[in-house]
Amino acid sequence: MSWGSNKPAPKKCEAATFKVVWICTNRKSFLSGLDLMPFLGTPLHISCFAHVLSKNKYPNFRCYLGNIWLLTPVEHKIYDHGTLQDRETYSKTVKTADWSKLEEKEIELKKLYDLYFPKKTGLILNKYLPWDVENITKDLNHIFLDELKRKGS
């Protein structure tokens, strides 16, 4: 995978997660269905992997397969940094773009995050030990992959 010159290489677990997402999907945008193969081997390839829940606000889902969905680099940029107007404009140009799919995914993932990583109180507020996060993520990834197999996606 080419990470591009303008973006830092992802963390080790994130890079492995991206590879699994790429292998286990149809390599099309979740949002619009556009083909992502033209980005393979280019500096933009890394931008095809979008975290539905941000890595900053939801760090324990950084490497959860169900939180990473393929988008075109433009869609990813609009999703992360764009306005409602940007989304509407894009949807007029790309008629297949359905932003509600990502909004629904976001709601679903927030519930799952709160279930597996409830807010803690005490000295270490909202912190989980790295191996706990790793074990929970590993279990969730197995569940996610089993669901993909069942659905035939």
Image (cartoon, rainbow, N blue to C red):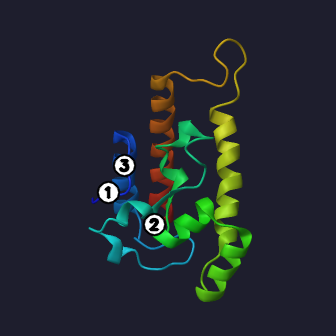
Q: Do callouts 1 and 3 mark residues in contact (Cβ within 8 Å)? A: yes
Judging by the rendered image, the residue that carries numbered circle 3 is 8
Q: Amino acid at mark 1?
A: Trp
Which quarter of the picture shows residue 77? bottom right
Q: Amino acid at mark 3?
A: Pro
Q: Mark 2 Cα within 10 Å, few/some/many (few <14, many 20+)?
A: few
Judging by the rendered image, the residue that carries numbered circle 2 is 152
* Local SS, label 2: loop
Residue at 61 percent of width and 64 percent of height: 79
Q: Earlier in the sequence, mark 2 or mark 3?
A: 3
> Viewer-proximal residue, 15 or 134?
15
> Viewer-proximal residue, 55 or 143?
55
Q: Amino acid at mark 2?
A: Gly
Q: Going by the image, does 35 lie left or right of 119?
A: left
* Residue sitting farthest toward the top: 123
* Local SS, label 3: loop
Q: Is residue 118 above or below residue 84?
A: above
Q: Going by the image, does 65 lie left or right of 98?
A: left
Q: Earlier in the sequence, mark 1 or mark 3?
A: 1
| Residue 92 percent location from the top left of the image | 66, 87
